[in-house]
Image (cartoon, rainbow, N blue to C red):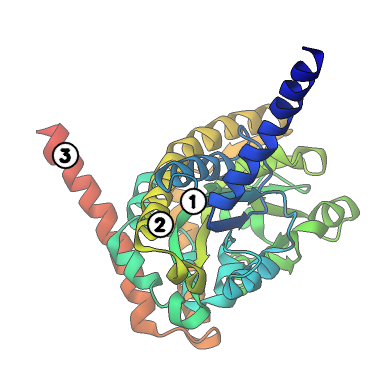
Amino acid sequence: MNANRSLLFTALAALPLAVASATAQAQSYEMVIATQLPEDMSNNEIYPALVHFKNLVEARTDGDLEVTIFGGGQLGSEVENGSEVQGGRTLQSTIMSAGAMSSFYGDYQAVTAPFLFTSWRQAWTFFDSEWFADFMSGSVDAASMRYLGTFDDGGGFVAFTNNVRLIETLEDLEGLNIRTEENPAHVAIMRSLGASATPLPWGELITALETGLADGQFNAPVLNTTFNFDAVTDYTTLTGHVYNSAPWVVSESWYQSLPETHQQAVISSAREAIQLSHGMSGALATASWVESCERFESCYPMPDAERERMAEIARPAWQEWIVNDFGMDEARMQGLLDEVERVGQQLAEDDLRIYGQ
């Protein structure tokens, strides 16, 4: 009796290993995704969206395509991740900033235009449109990356933080030394507005503010509070002069290796994940701006009239830079700006037609 019981316990103990082995054998494909955002379900919209994507894909492929997410920059920098995705062997997908994406597919630089959007709905409608998907289709040939969609990087619209004075007018930027991403578009925008620009990688930002190498910086309010910029700067102003976006790409060679059913699962699940992220992004950004006003010494939401003053200076300077220095085709650049404006006008007309009559 005891011998039989011992054999039973041994068999039961081995059962989980047998199940795990069978599961491992059943899984045919793997998708590893890298992001710089932390693996946190509450302080950013990208990680929860990726978790939702993972659940959808694995359910829709009956576990045949396993998705693994590495957050917090565990697998390297944005550019390092992008290079790995091009090969598609060790890393199949990543989310990058606009600047990093532009180093692989230069035309993405067009969405760094200052004061490009006036509302989240306009931004979301534009980035989710067939027009923009077609605009990004060139990334397949140019970079061996397939575009899946665009997240809002920290909520999209940015706010200045600085140590010198509260920015209430265009003139208040004069003489300030602002840290920017290593993105020449942002440098051109700052210089056009009368500020100096110091491009630095993310990892050097806090030290630059602490040591006085930079007077200030701009990021979405979500990032300003999450990374405690109130500890190293005193003033914050919500200008929205840049809309930070985070394109999501997948290795084209890996994508083409999938059966059609799995390709469909990846695409449809990605589109749902993007939609899920939008609402969370807006809510987080709104809450973070309220929190900013509690934590910084002074806060100021810049009125539309003053934003338009800034836009009238920054837009022409940026257009000159992107055509003459960056080398983007002027017609292609203007086509994007025209489409953004058309989307905004269409939304306003539809709102009035549907709800205002």
Distance Cα–Cα, label 1 vs label 3: 47 Å
Circle nearer the N terminus (1, 2): 1
Residue occupying the point 59% across, 29% down:
290
Mark 3 neighbour density, 10 Å: few (under 14) some (14–19) many (20 or more):
few
**From the viewer's perspective, is 24 left or right of 120?**
right
Q: Secondary structure at mark 1?
A: loop
Furthest residue toward top: 1
The answer to whether 43 appears left or right of 267 in the picture is: right
Depth check, mark 1 against mark 3: the one in front is 1
Q: What residue is pinned by disc 1?
A: 64
Relative depth, front residue between 139 and 219: 139
Q: Is residue 62 left or right of residue 72?
A: left
Q: Amino acid at mark 3?
A: Leu
Left or right for 91, reference 177: left
Kindly report which numbered mark, 1 or 2, lies closer to the viewer in this rendering: 1
What amino acid does circle 2 point to?
A: His
| Residue ID for mark 3 | 352
Disc 1 vs disc 2: Cβ atoms closer than 8 Å? yes
In the rendered view, tell whether residue 21 sits above or below residue 297: below
Q: Position of residue 268 (x, y in %)?
A: 36, 51
Identify the residue at horizontal 46%, vertical 75% (top origin): 139
